[in-house]
Amino acid sequence: MTDVKTADSRRKAVEQLPLAFSHDAATGRDDLLISERLAAAVSIVDAWPQWPSPVVILAGPVGSGKTHLANIWKEHSGAVSIHPKPGANAAVAAASNPVLFEDVDRVGFDDTELFHVINSVRENGNSLLMTSRLWPMSWPVELADLRSRLKAATVVEIGEPDEDLLSQVIVKLFSDRQLYIDDKLVLYIVARMERSLNAAQTIVERLDRLALSRGTKITRSLAAEVLNELGNSDPAD
């Protein structure tokens, strides 16, 4: 019995070791998986610089694809990443370049600095793309002039992914790692996982890690173990 416990402890210790391997995720425009929930956001990114307003905000839940789209736009437009806070010279950057401000609701901002950024963008014919989990009406804005500027921005919502998109994403994530799994296993995972792209990333990373540490293929039983660990298992299993 002691030997069994020791072996199990060793196996878990190996599984917890960080792996030295890495993989290249495909994150370019041609690698973007487009579904109905993402179509409006993709269209606005592709339409630049013919935007309906100088400021565009992509709003959607964690793992919804905001960062992927922001990176595509940044590469296409030559935008500079900014953080509107005192001393960061964000408004100066906005005077000569398109600018990108990601995770607005998470990293926060200074009202006056963001107001100056938007004014700089408007006065110099540039563009500002912002990403957020929340709509701008939910941001903690106290400056009335900034609230007015944000009301004039174009807000594009990204909804939660459906099962079809999640299936495509999981296949893509495995493909990025040079791994190919059965369609039935993909459907098994999608039917039981949290409906988010962030969860898909976590599941694929965990499955890859476990399979490598144990020297096995990615199977339904391995998937069930990972889903159970993440609290996404089906009670009927």
Image (cartoon, rainbow, N blue to C red):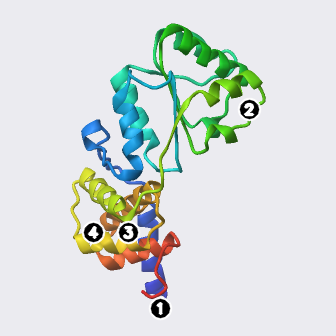
N-terminal label among 4 and 2? 2
SS at mark 4 in the image: loop
SS at mark 2 in the image: loop
Decide: marks 4, 2 in contact (CB < 8 A)? Answer: no
Image coords of residue 46 (percent x, y): 34, 31
Which residue in the protein does label 4 denote?
215
Counting the numbered discs, the total is: 4
Reply above or below: 20 against 131: below
Q: How far apart are marks 1 and 3 (CA)?
A: 37 Å
- Quarter of the view holding residue 203: bottom left
Which residue in the protein does label 1 denote?
1
SS at mark 3 in the image: helix
Image coords of residue 11 (percent x, y): 41, 72
| Foreground disc of the pair 2, 1 | 2
Mark 2 nearby-residue class (10 Å; few <14, some 14–19, many ≥20): some
| Foreground disc of the pair 4, 2 | 2
Image coords of residue 149 (percent x, y): 64, 24
| Foreground disc of the pair 4, 3 | 3
N-terminal label among 2 and 1? 1
Image coords of residue 174 (percent x, y): 28, 57
Q: Which residue is drawn at 30% across and 49% down?
A: 33
* Amino acid at pointer 2: Val
Q: Distance between the residues labelled 4 and 3?
A: 24 Å
- As drawn, is 84 to the left or to the right of 126? right
Q: Distance between the residues labelled 4 and 1?
A: 24 Å
Which residue in the protein does label 3 denote?
190
Reply above or below: 88 against 219: above
- As drawn, is 68 to the left or to the right of 128? left
N-terminal label among 1 and 3? 1
Q: Residue at x 30, y 63 (%)?
A: 212
Q: Residue 141 carries which label?
A: 2
* Amino acid at pointer 1: Met
